[in-house]
Amino acid sequence: MYQLTRGVLALMIGFIISIVFGVILVPLLKKLKARQTLSSYVFKAHKEKAGTPTMGGLIFIIPTILAIIVLLLWNKIEFSANLFIVMFVFLSYALLGFIDDYLIIKRKNNEGLTVVQKLIGQILIAIIFFIIYMKSGAEPIVEIYTLGIEINLGWFYGIFILFMLVASSNAVNITDGLDGLAGGLSLIAFLTFALISANSPAIQGTSDISVFCFVLVGCLLGFLAFNSRPAKVFMGDTGSLALGAVMATIAIITSHELTFIIIAGVFIFETLVCLIQIVSMVFFHKKVFLMTPFHHHLEKLGWNERDIVVVFWCIGLLLSMAAIVFGVWY
């Protein structure tokens, strides 16, 4: 009951701070002309979104950091190596995305950081993650409690961390194409991880990571007040890269890598659709889908944007409920 009370308090604090911060930030972004630059290949129905401010991920990133600092000073949570890793990855990927968004705004096109520049940044983050994680007493083991499987990856564990961070951050980034879509799915995913983390008492600091997730859920709820259709602001790479990376980080730290595949099912599906389309175009010169990611394919079929978002949210919620059963109960 105490853990639930802490979670509710954390969620409430995150929500209030993000709402206040959003009220200040959105007009400021408009004034600074931090506007979204749309690709020439963008779906025609989205032309009306041109000029919408980006970098809206700051609405849930900065309030989350502030809320965690408040809770630490208030002695409601304890500082641990795992909590530091989560905060470090969250901020590092947010900074990486912020630089990318800033360059796009400055150049007034869709050319931000190059793939190589992003990869170098992601490799450095993964190396620091690996070093701190190993020094905290963790072992390079992928453990699937439900199936009773342990896989010792040794030095390859660092590459595994890099793959998880890169794949997850890009998956959320790809899914961030409709108003409220990535934000709502992320809210559901982090609420699930909050509940799973609360049930991982054997792992150091996971109760505090659970509180971090609850704070982020509250902040995402506040963000959706500005991002739901019609969006007043987009999260940009600043938000999507940070969300995806920290989602993977929490899955690794709580030893729920397999459960993560279920929780992030919609994000993974969207990414696989893009990969299938690329492979088909390169080798067979044919399109499998009318347009990728899959939410744009549905738009091409005549689906309404709001309906697509609601359906995807429902699927994400069902997958998350299944993940809780798989990752906690069994």
Image: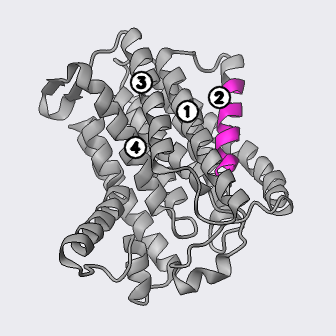
In this view, the mark in front (1 or 4): 4
As measured in the structure, the alpha-carbon distance from the residue carrying label 4 to the one carrying label 3 is: 13 Å
As measured in the structure, the alpha-carbon distance from the residue carrying label 1 to the one carrying label 4 is: 21 Å
The numbered mark, 1 or 4, whose residue comes first in the sequence reads: 4
Q: Which residues are magenta?
A: 57-70
Mark 2 touches mark 3? (CB < 8 Å): no
Q: Is residue 107 left or right of residue 121?
A: right
The numbered mark, 2 or 4, whose residue comes first in the sequence reads: 2
Q: Assign a secondary structure to mark 2.
A: helix
Where, quadrant-wise, is the C terminus in this rendering? Answer: top left
Identify which residue is drawn at 62% across, 39% down.
95
Q: Nearer the viewer, residue 315 or 249?
A: 249
Q: Assign a secondary structure to mark 3.
A: helix
Report the residue marked by disc 2: 68
Mark 1 touches mark 3? (CB < 8 Å): no
Report the residue marked by disc 1: 212
In this view, the mark in front (2 or 4): 4
Q: Residues within 10 Å of mark 1 (few under 14, many from 20)?
A: many
